[in-house]
Image (spheres, grey):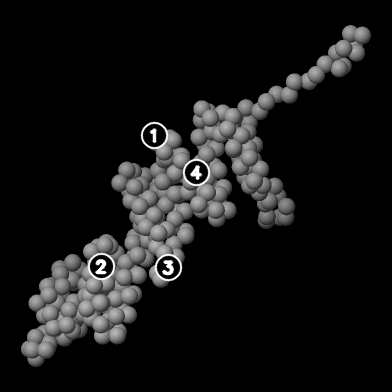
């Protein structure tokens, strides 16, 4: 009877720890080799394991790390809205965590990767700019700062490019008033865009063609002052020279 009793005693299964769930999730992210150069990664199951940590061990450091890993999985799956939500929650819930700069940067990337053509809604571009600026303001020496600066510059150029493109359209049609409005908007809203001096040249030429020579002269001098001779590439130098000559001729002719 003693032997029988021992054999039928219920077994108690050991509940995995927060670390156990988390480590198993990491193992799944490594993937299982299917072919020689291909690994099959079970992302849904990895998310389930990380969620187990988040739900059952909310005060564990592994729960914090699981939140970040879940965001990374969604990002890798090109599910940017879900990823952005997790990155944002991470920053708000753990403001002093050393991985906050990473989360802010990746949050910005979620929007950056969704930027659309210049004739479409630019909300993702604006959101990317906002996140990268937050990172650079709070953590200017972060290891992600340089990459954030590069993508910030690209996003700013993208937004400025929309106004410039429309300005060029009006310029080609001879609607210089409308062109001036667009060029000014690009310069005022995005003063750091990379073609800033070229936009000044376009603005100045539009003003010149409108007969506003004094304003055109001011813009011409501003363009020269902002880009010293040694920093002007050949194409821009030619455009500035042509602009200056045409402005001089227009003044002399009284046109």
Circles 1 and 3 in contact, beta carbons < 8 Å? no
Q: Report the side of 120 relative to 8 (left or right).
A: left
Q: Nearer the viewer, mark 1 or mark 3?
A: 3
Q: Which mark is residue 120?
A: 3
In space, the residues marked 1 and 3 are separated at their CA atoms by 37 Å
Residue holding disc 1: 96
Q: How far is disc 4 from disc 1 in space, using C-alphas?
A: 16 Å
Q: Position of residue 120 (x, y in %)?
A: 42, 68
| Crowd rating for badge 4 (residues with CA inside 10 Å; few <14, some 14–19, many 20+) | many
- Which comes sooner in the sequence, label 3 or label 4? 4
Comparing marks 1 and 2, which lies closer to the viewer? Answer: 2
Q: Which residue does the numbered mark 2 point to in the structure image?
A: 185
Q: Which mark is residue 86?
A: 4
Secondary structure of residue under mark 2: helix
Chain-order first, disc 4 or disc 1: 4
Give the mark, 3 or 2, whose residue is nearer the N terminus. Answer: 3
- The answer for how far apart the CA atoms under marks 1 and 2 are is 38 Å
* 161 to 39, vertically: above or below: below
């Amino acid at each position: 009877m003693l032997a029988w009793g021992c054999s039928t005693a219920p077994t108690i299964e050991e509940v995995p720890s927060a670390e156990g769930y988390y480590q198993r999730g990491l193992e799944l992210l490594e993937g299982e080799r299917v072919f020689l150069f291909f690994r099959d990664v079970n992302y849904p199951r990895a998310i389930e394991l990380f969620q187990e940590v988040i739900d059952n061990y909310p005060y564990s450091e592994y729960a914090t790390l699981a939140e970040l890993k879940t965001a990374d999985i969604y990002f890798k799956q090109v599910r940017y809205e879900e990823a952005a939500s997790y990155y944002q929650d991470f920053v708000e819930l753990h403001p002093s965590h050393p991985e906050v700069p990473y989360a802010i940067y990746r949050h910005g990337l979620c929007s950056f990767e969704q930027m659309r053509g210049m004739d479409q809604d630019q909300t993702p571009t604006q959101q990317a700019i906002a996140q990268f600026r937050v990172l650079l303001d709070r953590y200017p020496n972060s290891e992600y700062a340089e990459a954030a600066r590069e993508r910030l510059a690209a996003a700013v150029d993208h937004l400025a490019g929309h106004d410039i493109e429309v300005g060029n359209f009006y310029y080609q049609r001879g609607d210089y008033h409308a062109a001036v409005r667009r060029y000014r908007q690009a310069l005022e809203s995005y003063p750091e865009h990379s073609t800033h001096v070229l936009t000044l040249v376009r603005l100045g030429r539009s003003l010149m063609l409108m007969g506003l020579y004094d304003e055109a002269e001011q813009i011409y001098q501003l363009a020269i002052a902002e880009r010293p001779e040694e920093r002007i590439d050949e194409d821009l130098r030619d455009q500035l020279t042509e602009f200056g000559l045409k402005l001089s001729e227009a003044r002399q002719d009284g046109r």
